[in-house]
Amino acid sequence: MVSGVMTPELHVASASAVEVANGARALTAAATAIRVDDVSMTYTVGRKGKRTVLQNISLEIEEGECVVLLGETGCGKSTLLRMLLGQEPPTSGSITVAGKPVERVDSRSGYVPQRYSLFPDRTVLENLCMGPETSKAHIFGRLMPGFRAFRKTVRAEAMRQLEHMGLHASDAAKYPHQLSGGMQQRVAIAQALMMKSRVLLMDEAFSALDPATRASLQRLLRSVWSETKPTIVFVTHNTAEALFLGTRVIVLRRESREDSCGSRVALDMKLPAAGMSLHRNGKEFLDLVEYIESFSRGDHQKVSSDGDDRDGSAFEAETTTVFPLDGETL
Ligand SMILES: Nc1ncnc2c1ncn2[C@@H]1O[C@H](COP(=O)(O)OP(=O)(O)OP(=O)(O)O)[C@@H](O)[C@H]1O
Ligand SMILES: [Mg+2]
């Protein structure tokens, strides 16, 4: 058993253990939830200008992974999330979720943004029920027999989700402006879970909250993930949050500021599904934070032994596995 491999040096030293671990994982391979195949995104700027935001991104995310996307501001994290959701198509390449191409926003993925995702003129309960009710029946369908019973079931489920998120039954009748930011984000998560989506896309969902509320929502999300193992893609700027929530960390980075140069995957790293924290892991945790952040800053551009950029690109994805594996705890 290999344990506590946290630093780049140790990672290199344990290459054979990584292979063994990868082999073990292959035996229990989960189905692919999200496949991003050679995706690039170029926006038109002004009359003729073009700006490439993402360049040749390829990712395979298995069902039940909690992938945290990191990278400096403007590197394209939200753009990638919007494409996974189906809000905008990539300029080139393809994206599939649950084996089917993503063409529009649909119930395969739930989305939780930083804030303001609730309808302000609807109560909490109405916000929660809206998705399932709309997907079941349009306006005339609501007159059909069976809709009342369906509605009753949806309401019961909404109340269950509300309680699950730590809110009171009496909050169901409140409007979003009557809730704190933390309560609103709890409702937003419940809203996404109401659709029973297997994929949850969260864009800095906790970053507008005070530290204590943020910590309690991080714990809540971890417990949701442990219970039902949805596939999560979570965008954050906070590396500590990434290590607490994620089973895998992906860092996007632009190699240069030129408009033709989009972000690529600078680091793609598996983490133990144990919820790392400074409290529990001390120096190892801090070393790992520093290691991940060095990819975001670009300190880890690969240079060949003669000092020249490798392939002239000096930029290649680094894929590593952080131990422990096989259920060993940190
Ligand atoms: N519709 C658009 N048209 C033109 N440029 C866009 C559009 N949407 C995003 N961009 C540009 O793409 C780049 C990446 O934006 P994006 O919002 O994905 O970054 P981000 O990594 O989420 O940043 P942050 O961490 O600040 O949220 C930015 O330079 C942004 O200006
Ligand atoms: Mg963003």
Image (cartoon, helix red, strand yellow):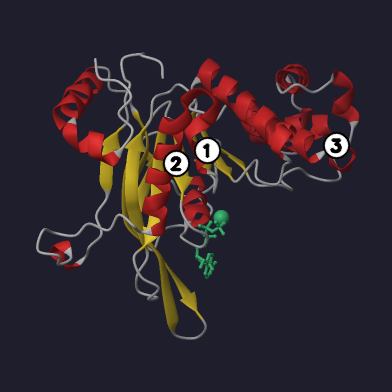
Q: Which residue is more in the foreground, 230 or 103?
A: 230
Check disc 1 and report its element: helix, strand or loop: helix
Q: Quadrant of residue 286?
A: top left
Q: Which residue is mark 3?
A: 179
Cα separation, mark 3 vs mark 2, equals 34 Å
* Above or below 315: residue 193: above
Q: Quadrant of residue 146?
A: top right
Q: Which residue is mark 1?
A: 240
Provide residue 156's location: percent of width, then percent of height: 76, 16
Label 2 or label 1, whichever comes before in sequence order: 1
Q: Quadrant of residue 49?
A: bottom left
**Does residue 211 appear left or right of residue 236 in this picture?**
right
Label 3 or label 2, whichever comes before in sequence order: 3
Provide residue 34's location: percent of width, then percent of height: 39, 38
Q: Amino acid at mark 2?
A: Val
Question: Crowding near pointer 3: few (<14 within 10 Å), some, many (20+)?
Answer: some
Kindly check if marks 2 and 1 are in contact, taking CB atoms under 8 A apart as contact: yes
Check disc 3 and report its element: helix, strand or loop: loop
Q: Which residue is mark 2?
A: 289
Image quarter (top left, top right, bottom left or bottom right) of the N terminus: top left
The residue mark sitting in front, 1 or 3, is 1
Residue lying at 74% horizontally and 26% vertically, measured from the top left: 144
Cα separation, mark 2 vs mark 1, equals 7 Å
**Does residue 209 appear left or right of residue 329 in this picture?**
right
* Above or below 106: residue 230: above
The residue mark sitting in front, 3 or 2, is 2
